Amino acid sequence: MTAEKATAKAVPAAEAWLKLVDSGAYEESWDQAAPMFKDRVQKNDWTNAAQAVREPLGPVAERTVETTRYATELPGAPDGHYVIIQFRTVFANKKNSVETVTPMLTDGGTWRVSGYYIK
């Protein structure tokens, strides 16, 4: 798999997943996440943490892809196909944020989010 092909599929998958988080559909975002994500965080814990972190930030005013990096190895994760995507995000209550979303190619051939962080 080429980095370009992986990125072309992973970025839209990440953006679709972020729309769920943006809309407060935290349970559904957990349902749509990669099995590795679900193995590491229980649904209720994800829902509570996502709500606690995201809601004070307010709605997304702007989000743009800043960087992408294709990887087959990541620390603490099984070998596979990953794209680490950094979005420059402007929230209503936080103007300068970086969201890091890491989709992975799952066994079913679908890109699903395996990690999410906000700085």
Image (cartoon, grey):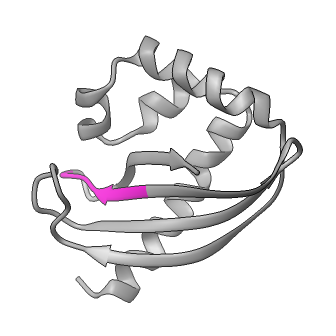
Whether residue 88 is situated above or below residue 2 in the rendered picture: above
- Which image quadrant: the N terminus? bottom left
Percent across and percent down for residue 58 are 83, 36
| Residue 106 magenta | yes
In magenta, the rendered stretch is 102-107
Question: Main SS of the magenta segment?
Answer: strand
Percent across and percent down for residue 40 are 26, 29
| Residue 110 magenta | no
**Residue at horizontal 32%, vertical 77%?**
70
**Residue at horizontal 31%, vertical 37%?**
37
**Residue at horizontal 40%, vertical 66%?**
84
Given the current orientation, which residue lies at the most extreme left position?
79
Whether residue 75 is situated above or below residue 58 in the rendered picture: below
**Residue at horizontal 49%, vertical 47%?**
117
Percent across and percent down for residue 113 are 41, 49
Percent across and percent down for residue 83 are 37, 68
